[in-house]
């Protein structure tokens, strides 16, 4: 068994990672894909991926998502090929992950999994000394049949959805900061990183030249994944969110996209309602696990 640490993945390694995820999802009946980029990580030189190989076959993958400084938590995504489990591969990869996180000053982390996996593996939490953080759970939602915008929708006459350009970054960052309570510098970095990522499309919702909302879309192997979606506070409750996501799907469908996915906080009933109106259905529940060690 060979363990390799990488800051970025090559095209070949990305293909291997996607193939591994497909095997894992088929066996576990899970849905979530790994984000195969370090674009949003706080430290751009920090090894983000730990890969485990049996000869030339990728049988294990760990991804560290650390988009904030060392005072915050790192999301640890870890998967092992079903045929190679209970051989200590996960433990070996996580030992590498811990060394990396501590080296960069991180001492808090949480694992990401899906409820269906824990139901199929009831001893997992005890064996790994982990516990579920219930307030952090969210739903994985997907659609292959988006609800179309009606021709009579008056928002078509007053709103526009366009790709983000650098000229709008400051406006979007201000709205992002207002929506999420982040510092302007943090929001600006987040928006710029989305814009610069070759696998991400960034959209803005406009009324004239005023930015009302923003969303990034990761073009993955099997789906287009929406993230960072928000409508600025003064414009909520007017149907703008539903219009925005429907319009983005129309644009992406014209470019060949067929499957759309996102995650919504379990307690965010308003957001879930918006996504359901656009055609999304809840397929899985994502859970976050913590250890005493973190």
Image: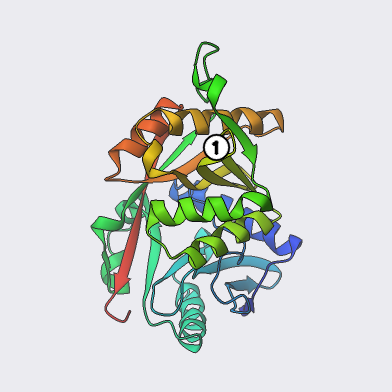
Q: Nearer the viewer, residue 39 or 162?
A: 162
Q: Nearer the viewer, residue 281 or 198?
A: 198
**Is 1 rendered above or below residue 212?**
below
Residue extending furthest toward the front? 209
Residue 68 drawn at (x, y percent): 46, 71
Q: Residue at x 55, y 69 (%)?
A: 41
Residue 127 drawn at (x, y percent): 30, 72
Q: Residue at x 29, y 66 (%)?
A: 125
Tell me where residue 13 sits by quadrant. Answer: bottom right
Residue extending furthest toward the right? 11
Name the side, left or right, on which 128 lies relative to 171. left
Q: Say few, some or many: other residues with alpha carbon within 10 Å of mark 1 (under 14 / 14 to 19 / 20 or more).
A: many
Residue 103 drawn at (x, y percent): 50, 88
On the rendered image, what quadrant is the C terminus found in?
Answer: bottom left
Secondary structure of residue under mark 1: strand
Circle 1 sits on which residue? 205
Residue 265 drawn at (x, y percent): 34, 48
């Amino acid at each position: 068994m060979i363990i390799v640490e990488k800051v970025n993945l090559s095209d070949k390694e990305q293909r291997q990672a996607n193939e591994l995820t497909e095997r894992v999802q088929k066996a576990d009946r899970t849905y979530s894909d790994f984000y195969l980029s370090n674009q949003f990580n706080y430290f751009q030189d920090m090894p983000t991926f730990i890969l485990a190989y049996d000869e030339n076959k990728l049988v294990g993958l760990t991804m560290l998502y650390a988009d904030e400084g060392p005072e915050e938590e790192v999301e640890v995504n870890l998967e092992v090929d079903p045929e190679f489990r209970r051989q200590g591969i996960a433990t070996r990869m996580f030992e590498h992950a811990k060394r990396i996180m501590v080296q960069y000053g991180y001492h808090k982390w949480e694992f990401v999994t899906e409820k269906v996996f824990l139901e199929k593996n009831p001893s997992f939490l005890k064996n790994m000394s982990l516990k579920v953080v219930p307030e952090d759970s969210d739903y994985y939602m997907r659609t292959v049949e988006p609800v179309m915008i009606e021709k009579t929708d008056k928002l078509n006459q007053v709103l526009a959805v366009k790709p983000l350009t650098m000229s709008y970054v400051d406006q979007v960052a201000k709205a992002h900061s207002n929506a999420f309570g982040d510092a302007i510098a943090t929001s600006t970095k987040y928006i710029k990183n989305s814009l610069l990522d070759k696998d991400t499309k960034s959209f803005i919702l406009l009324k004239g030249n005023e930015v009302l909302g923003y969303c990034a879309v990761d073009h993955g192997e099997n789906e287009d994944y929406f993230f960072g979606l928000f409508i600025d506070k003064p414009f909520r409750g007017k149907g703008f969110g539903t219009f925005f996501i429907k319009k983005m799907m129309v644009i992406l469908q014209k470019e060949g996209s067929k499957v759309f996915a996102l995650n919504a906080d379990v307690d965010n009933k308003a957001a879930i309602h918006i996504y359901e109106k656009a055609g999304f259905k809840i397929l899985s529940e994502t859970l976050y696990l913590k250890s005493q060690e973190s």
